[in-house]
Image: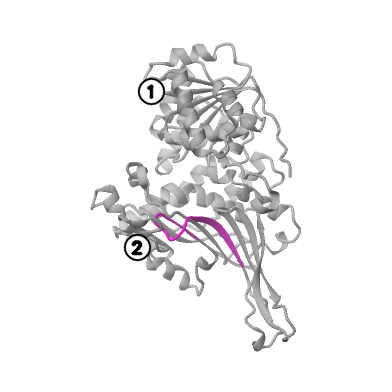
Amino acid sequence: MAVRVIEVDPFDLIVFGATGDLAHRKLLPALYHRDLDGQIPDDARVIACSRRPMSDGEYRAFAREAVCEHVSDVEETALTRFLDRLRYLSVDAAGGDGWPDLTALLAGREGVVRAFYLAVSPDFFGSICARIGSEGLATDLSRIVIEKPIGKDGASARALNAAIGQVFREDQIFRIDHYLGKETVQNLMALRFANALFEPLWNAAHIDHVQITVAESLGVEGRAGYYDTAGAMRDMVQNHILQLLCLVAMEPPESMSADSVRDEKLKVLKALTPIGADLAPTRTVRGQYRAGASSGGAVRGYLEELDDPSSDTETFVAIKAEIANWRWAGVPFYLRTGKRLAARVSEIVVQFRPIPHSIFGEDVGHVDPNRLVIRLQPDEGVRMQVMIKDPGPGGMRLRQVPLDMSFAAAFKVRNPDAYERLLMDVIRGNQTLFMRRDEVEAAWAWVDPILEAWAAHKEPPKGYTSGTWGPSAAIALIERDRRTWFEDLI
């Protein structure tokens, strides 16, 4: 099946932090793939900026290494064409060095899209934006792309948004969440709103509960310094998981325009039942991994990796969330995320209610409720668990089987990385898959009371052995409601 590729307008993409891990693992390979598919016009440039002194040739060698390491079957002609687009400048994000060179390189191209990608610590977001403004580099065709975390709490997020807003209009600001660029996440929209089958059932009358799991088998690896200041709540729940919850729970938007979609997501965030000091002990669980085993052998615990025995940063969170509106009243959303868990998987499980009455006798087998499983990673796809008759002449016997659609198997095409789509959406100016300022602040308004409750209770995170599914309290969280985590699906 051929993939339709639409070329974007000419652009200058200026990447701050261009020698960092994000550029190496994600941005450069994504841009190479878009160039390989013919989506990037001849007049487009990628301007790499970092403090490290480096020539164009040296940076192209860095980019070649990144592409060859993270892309299979590299095509040499396409790679050479892509590398020729790259320019490198040594620019001090916190000071004045290198900015005149950047201004000179951009001069005369005010009529093309100019996208600034801040692949740097959030501590530099405000200063870089201020410098872009003072140097006169922000044009009507400019965009600014910022990565999470957007603040450490609601107050810092508002301050950061205000600083960026001093230079860029809201329609020029692209707050990126790579989960929203995943093929399956967008197929969730198609599944709900392009099929008559599901939407009439997508409510409390037919859905028993929803589970959202984002599990990682790795530890903090090289991110220990950052992670210990954030924890699983700030790193994953406030952004990725709440965005997935919004896409599952939102009302049908008026259209697929950016503001129509984001208006409906905002309504969900505002309808989340607050979890304060009174509810946090029974609605939330925070954990921290201990030494254990993984597929690669024995692994150290978080405190050993961090080399700080006093840290109480959580590496696991489970939450029972509820949405106080007409569609979802009484339907719990069970959220969990963690590091050093039993498997690397991200998925959404929509558990439907049991049939109201079974016409079958007890000897046919148990009639299980239908279940929709939306897998984000690995092996993106959608699976529907349905009841059928077991084949054979021996009478009526029922069993549950999956109606399975793997994207890789169904479409026979390479599944593009989320950054490929999101980078091209930045150039197009399409903000549908990016967070709006009020979304970010509404998410913090729900998360902040939980963080404050944890701080007030001063209870250390519950330990769990690496290679398991988290602390036993997370199992109790859902089993108190006579439900269970669907780990057998993973």
Assess whether residue 465 is covered by the magenta stretch.
no
Say whether residue 483 is left or right of residue 189. Answer: left
The residue at 72%/84% (across/down) is 396
Residue that carries the numbered disc 2 in the rendered image: 464
In the rendered image, the vertical position of residue 23 relative to residue 248, given as above or below: above
In the rendered image, the vertical position of residue 375 relative to residue 476, given as above or below: above
Assess whether residue 350 is covered by the magenta stretch.
yes
Say whether residue 286 is left or right of residue 135. Answer: left
Looking at the image, can residue 268 be seen?
Answer: no
Residue stretch rendered in magenta on the structure: 335-351
The residue at 68%/88% (across/down) is 361
- Which numbered disc covers residue 255? none
The N terminus, quarter of image: top right
Say whether residue 26 is left or right of residue 366. Answer: left
Looking at the image, can residue 82 be seen?
Answer: yes
Measured as percent of width and height from the top left, residue 474 is found at 42, 65
Q: Quadrant of residue 201?
A: bottom right
